[in-house]
Amino acid sequence: MKKILIFGSGSHSKVVLSEILQTKKYKVIGFVDEKLKKGTVVGKFGNKTFKVICNISKLKNIVDKILYGIDKNKFWLPKTSSCFA
């Protein structure tokens, strides 16, 4: 299962989270947001809580440790089939 981060924590990010979870193809690591503090809960689905894990300036450290969706200088973007995402 590929790991994925969601950028931003506004209302649209919750729609994106919902769509990603429905595909059951990705493990959502959390959210990247400049305004909210690390650890702030952005969404809850079932018994799972999704939080802000860092801001953009801290992202490189996170990427180096846990992400497989970013390959050196390339980002991959998952495809969703919803008109809401």
Image: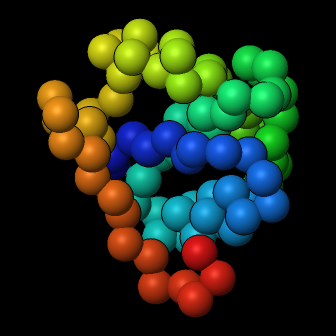
Determine whether, in the image, residue 10 is placed left or right of residue 15. right
Query: Which of the 4 image quadrants contains residue 40?
Result: top right
Above or below residue 70? Residue 82 is below
Kindly identify the residue that appears in the image at 33 percent across and 46 percent down: 2
Above or below residue 62? Residue 44 is below
**Closer to the camera in the image, 69 or 73:** 73
Above or below residue 81? Residue 26 is above
Kindly identify the residue that appears in the image at 54 percent across and 25 percent down: 56
> What percent of the width, then of the height, locates residue 42?
80, 42
State the scheme by which the image is colored.
rainbow
> What percent of the width, then of the height, locates residue 78?
36, 63
Kindly identify the residue that appears in the image at 79 percent across and 29 percent down: 35
Determine whether, in the image, residue 69 is placed left or right of residue 48. left
**How many numbered circles does the render carry?**
0
> What percent of the width, then of the height, locates residue 34?
69, 28
Kindly identify the residue that appears in the image at 26 percent across and 37 percent down: 70
Whether residue 47 is visible to the viewer of this picture, yes or no, is no
Whether residue 71 is visible to the viewer of this picture, yes or no, is yes
Quadrant location of the C terminus? bottom right
> What percent of the width, then of the height, locates residue 50?
72, 39
Determine whether, in the image, residue 4 is placed left or right of residue 14. left
Determine whether, in the image, residue 77 is placed left or right of residue 13. left
Above or below residue 66? Residue 42 is below
| Extreme residue in the bottom direction | 83
Query: Which of the 4 image quadrants contains residue 39?
Result: top right
